[in-house]
Amino acid sequence: MSPASKEVQVAVVRPIAGEPTTFEVASKSEPGTWHRVDIKAHGGCGQCACIRWDTVSWPRIRDTRNLPPSMRCRHLKAAREYYTNHKIAAERAYE
Ligand SMILES: [Zn+2]
């Protein structure tokens, strides 16, 4: 049986100590490469070191000061989800 290549792969995210809104997200197309993502940059639109952010996300942010979720690169999406999940877990700890 072949690997489940059609399944959505959850990106591997790792936090950076002392930088609560900055993460490294593993590249899918370049194994071993990690893209640095700052989810708070550019007024909360976020920033990533990948080519899609440079060519798709950044021009939109530059021109409109906004970034629709559909124009986020997968690293930015993954980092935002990681951050959100940890915030929710922290809130649940108080229940
Ligand atoms: Zn990216």
Image (tube, rainbow, N blue to C red):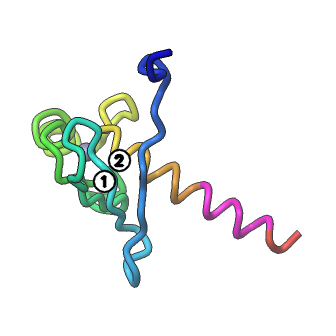
Whether residue 74 sits left or right of residue 53 in the image: it is right
**Can you tell me whether the CB of the residue at mark 2 lies under 8 Å from the nearest atom of ligand 1?**
yes
What amino acid is labelled 2 in the image?
A: Leu
> Residue at horizontal 25%, vertical 56%?
34
Q: Residue furthest right?
A: 95
Query: Where is mark 1, residue-wise?
Result: 46
- For residue 87: magenta? yes
The image quarter in which residue 95 lies: bottom right
The span shown in magenta is 85-92
Whether residue 55 sits left or right of residue 6 in the image: it is left
C-alpha gap between disc 2 and disc 1: 7 Å
Q: Is residue 29 above or below residue 48?
A: above
The image quarter in which residue 43 lies: bottom left
Where residue 7 appears, as percent x and y from the top left, is 49, 22
- The residue carrying pointer 1 sits among few (fewer than 14), some (14 to 19) or many (20 or more) residues within 10 Å by Cα, namely many
Where residue 66 appears, as percent x and y from the top left, is 30, 42
User: Of residues 10 and 78, which is closer to you in this image?
Assistant: 10
User: Of residues 46 and 5, which is closer to you in this image?
Assistant: 5
Where residue 60 appears, as percent x and y from the top left, is 19, 36
Quarter, ligand 1: top left
Numbered circle sitting on residue 76:
2
> Residue at horizontal 19%, vertical 42%?
30
Tag 2–tag 1 contact (CB < 8 Å): yes
SS at mark 2 in the image: helix
